[in-house]
Amino acid sequence: MNHWMIAPVVLPALVAPLIAYLMRYDQVLARVTSVVATLALLVISIGLAVQTTDGQVRVYHLGNWDAPFGIVLVLDRLSALLLVVTSALALLTLVHAIATDWDRAGRHFHALFQFQLMGISGAFLTGDAFNLFVFFEVLLIASYGLMIHGGGRARLRAGVRYVVMNLAGSTLFLFALGTLYAVAGTLNMADLAVKVREMPLEEAALLRVAAILLMVVFSIKAALFPVQFWLPGTYANAPAPVAALFAIMTKVGAYALIRMYITVFGPDVPGIDSLASDWLMPAAVITLALGAVGVMGARRLMTLVSFAVIVSMGTLMLGVSAFTPVATSASLYYLVHSTFAAAALFMLCDLVVTRRSNGDALFLSGATPQNGLFAALFFAGAIAIAGLPPLSGFLGKLMILQALFDRPWAWLTWAVILIGSLLTIIGFSRAGSLIFWKSATVPAPEEPAEGAPVTEPPTPASAMALAPTFGALALLAAMTVLAGPMMRYTDATAQQLFEREGYVGAVLGPREMHKTLHHDDAEHGEGSPGKAELDASGHGDATGHQDQGDHE
């Protein structure tokens, strides 16, 4: 077996307790260890992503127990892509936290940060729905601690709201898993993909209930309407590097929806039909609209960016809701873009807010040091999150619009995306004008009277503090320049997702793969497109899509 597959889970799991127990009083050692571990995680993730370019789905059997009885980790193009995004984002936010001394606001920042990475990496790698729940809990427990890092009444209040919302989601998740297990007798995703298709229609009522419950749970994580209200308060009040890291948290919910409703459920499952698309599309439309209204009405800079995150999630889920390879490919490209765009804005806002006398309140105040530089970075971040050229947000939205062109209600989705982009531009223009342009007209404060307390002027941001924001924006520029190779990767990722037989065959073995193929033939007739494409791509042989040889 390829033991590097488990490294993204084991590495932060080992480093976190070491930092918590041995380095809790040595901030320098904790910083160095955390950075080295996160850098190693990025290198390992890139190595795993390179391995997946051959099109194989790799499986790691924990304890050498075969699926569906043992626990498996599954590495395909999608999980590898999200591992790279997570580790790159983590490195940027960690450097920002160190450069701005946010990590000194509490003793356990680095330990919680590593536990968070363990939970996110595990969620992307697991091939079992119950372990998806376990990794959700790991990352949520760590995020509770990170959310209230540094203390403060507003942060604690937002943290309580975040905890209550996610506890409700976890409870629903357990109910859904219990229902699913009662119906199918398994929670292994590959095994579920086979069992749910063998289920007669008259026994599919409970399966439909489980599918709806799971959709509600993942919608909470993805901040979709009507359960999106926790996000603005949580992100706006979290420490800035934590909010930047949380940009990947909503993508975990989007990933779970993609994985479960393409690999496991689908329109060919009795009783499911077009359930996911029917519910996700209107939810995404309303989410996008509410986010755009929130951007227009925001009175705080961090709240403005938080609502922009909701807009981006609505756009992303509109693409996902089509459940076609073309739309999924476009959504994955946009997912990567929106993650780094939101992170760049949160980190930049932190640099600006800590140097303004009004904090992040959108009121006129004096100019900050490096006002011109901050304005240029804010302009770049704003056009990225709004989806304007020349950055990758424009390409991402354009590809989603093209993918939705021939879908039902295309006029509505086009109108919402375009109007939402316009309102986002207006909201960010208003904020940028107030903070960076009009602030230059405010006269400098008068010299304090003799004997009066002297307030130290804010200091310019260091090169190290600016580097993560520049890094995130540089990644967006790279996504634009390398859009062709990036799209080829997401195209191949989407194609692999919709070739469900490859995933099933890799996890369960060739026999179950051919059983699934046989079921598809029975459903669609001989020469169905799915089988034809599988044979033509050379993945239909007994070993072509799996790492079974390694396992043996």
Image: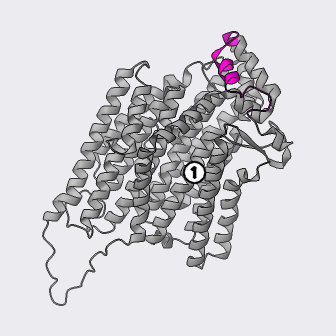
Of 99 and 447, nearer the camera is 99
**Residue at 71% over, 23% down:** 196
**Residue tagged by mark 1?**
84
**Residue at 13% over, 64% down:** 441
Furthest toward the right, the residue is 552
Judge whether residue 507 can be spotted in this image. yes
Q: Position of residue 126 (x, y in %)?
A: 69, 43
- On whether residue 120 falls in the magenta region, the answer is no
Q: Position of residue 407 (x, y in %)?
A: 44, 20
Quick one: SS at disc 1?
Answer: helix
For badge 1, the amino acid type reads Val
Whether residue 520 sits left or right of residue 90 in the image: it is: right
**Residue at 57% over, 32% down:** 494
Number of on-image labels:
1
For the rendered model, the colour scheme is one colour
Whether residue 324 sits left or right of residue 505 in the image: it is: left
**Residue at 41% over, 35% down:** 315
Q: Which residues are magenta?
A: 523-545
> Counting other residues with Cα less than 10 Å from the Cα at mark 1, is it few (<14), some (14-19), or many (20 or more)?
many
Of 511 and 441, nearer the camera is 511
Of 304 and 258, nearer the camera is 258
Q: Position of residue 448 (x, y in %)?
A: 17, 83
Furthest toward the bottom, the residue is 451
Picture quadrant of residue 142: bottom right
Of 472 and 156, nearer the camera is 472
Q: Position of residue 220 (x, y in %)?
A: 52, 40
Judge whether residue 148 can be spotted in this image. no
Q: Is residue 70 above or below residue 344?
A: above
Instruction: Report the quarter where the C terminus lies.
Output: top right
Q: Is residue 251 above or below residue 321?
A: below
Whether residue 53 sits left or right of residue 314 in the image: it is: right
